[in-house]
Image: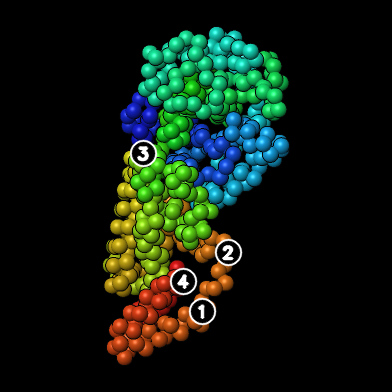
Amino acid sequence: MASPRFYNSLGRELQSFAPQDADTARIYTCGPTVYDTAHIGNLRTFLFEDVLCRALEFLGYDVTQVMNLTDVEDKIIAGAVEREISIDDYVSPHIDVFFRDLERLHIRKAEHYPRATQHIPEMISMIQTLEERGFAYSVEGSVFFHIDRFGPYGRLSGVDLGGAKRGERVADDEYEKDDVKDFVLWKAAKEGEPSWDSPWGAGRPGWHIECSAMSMKYLGESFDIHCGGVDNMFPHHENEIAQSEAATDVEFARYWLHSEHLLVDGRKMSKSLGNQYTLDHLIARDIDLRAVRYLFLSVPYRRKLNFTFSSVEGSASALRRVDQLRFRLETTAESDDSNSGIATACESLYTSFREALADDLNLSAALATVHIFVRDANVAVGQRRLNTGDRQRIIEALASVDRVLGVLDAGDWPTSQEGTDDSESSDDDIQTLVDARQGARIARDWAEADRLRDELVGAGIVVEDTPDGVRWKRE
């Protein structure tokens, strides 16, 4: 098994990947802070992590993935207090929506989804260790991390400690990206806010300690890959490294993979611009979520992705070529006398696809190999030179690479995002249009035949003219 190479943000270079356990890759991925519905920028990161896990399995590894659910932090507490409900009552609907959205994009579930509020004892224990080792200090019921006592601080993000002043502290869960200060591990309780008992008094954990404690519980003190969006690199991931390695004296995560931002029409997403889309927003605009998944796959994870509605339509067109191949296969005969080259094309697909995945998860190259294969298969089908067994070879080849892509089989996706469309034309109506088009072709009324074909395409119908007659199916 050839080792894949990934761009390790820790060191800023491509490195061969070799898990600590030769057979199993252990991966921690930063999950959502469940105070609101995830937008498509968040979902691009979660989809990248999904495909990373799928790709490693395709390349021969077992995978254990842990994704945290941050269910206690400033915004969540403010929302729960404002509505006068418990944290659990506040976050539960958002967690349900999160899992619904993962399912909508065919993002497979991780092995573990630990919630911060269910792991407070592990966090307190880790903070106590840091305090005993001289890396933490308490101030009026809160506990902070001494960043100047951790020598390697900044090696992931490249931040400069030169401007930091000893004793400056920041207690907020979110703060300015250039704010290099001692960060909070435990926050003293405020009146009216939920809290937990601790050796320092009532309070609750800071944001950063949550991921360190939970990743170690499920993956051990040292594991293989830590993932997240590039915006998490500082301060969150930098602080995770500092507190984790200060507590254990072992390397926390050996590879750090970060996905880039998603833009909308070339601009950063924001509520003020009205372009911070969720999947519900896209569904309301009748956007095909299968095409959205394809679009997210088509741009390498370390490049910014510019989301536009025209790019989604381009992705839908690319998928239609795959769907049309499947449709044509259903009506194409095979022959023992044919020399299609399909077996060779399948082997080439497997080899090139694996090479693309191993090259820092180069999905744009992987998709290019798929479309070369689809093109060659379509040529063989069109020339009616499929050899015996080629139909099954093509189907199995597409299914094999789709273990990673999760998007090539239209049958796995609903025809309507919210159930069956009652306005969908009946089979009899469609057959009437198909017959009318065939009649226009026989009469050589090409304008009318083209008009009817356009009407069929608009209704989501694929029409194939074959020597054995006209075939049609819904997309």
- Disc 4 on helix, strand or loop? strand
* Mark 2 or mark 3: whose residue is earlier in sequence: 3
The residue at which mark 1 appears reads as: 427
Q: Residue at x 52, y 16 (%)?
A: 169
Q: Residue at x 54, y 73 (%)?
A: 423
Label 1 is placed on what type of residue? Asp
Tell me the quarter of the image containing the C terminus. Answer: bottom left
Disc 3 residue type? Arg
Which three-letter amino acid code belongs to the residue tagged 4?
Arg
Q: Residue at x 65, y 31 (%)?
A: 117
Q: Earlier in the sequence, mark 4 or mark 2?
A: 2
Instruction: Name the element at disc 1.
Output: helix
Q: Which label's residue is closer to the chain start, 4 or 3?
A: 3
| Whole-number angstrom distance, CA of label 1 to CA of label 4 | 10 Å
| Dot 4 crowding, Cα within 10 Å, few <14, some 14–19, many 20+ | some
Q: CA distance from mark 2 to mark 3?
A: 35 Å
| Disc 2 crowd, CA 10 A, few/some/many (<14, 14-19, 20+) | few
Quickly name the residue at label 4. Answer: 474
Tell me which numbered mark, 3 or 1, is placed earlier along the sequence.
Answer: 3
Q: What is the spatial separation of the Cα atoms under label 4 and label 2, in whole angstroms?
A: 16 Å
Relative side of 145 to 72, left or right? left
Q: Amino acid at mark 2?
A: Gly
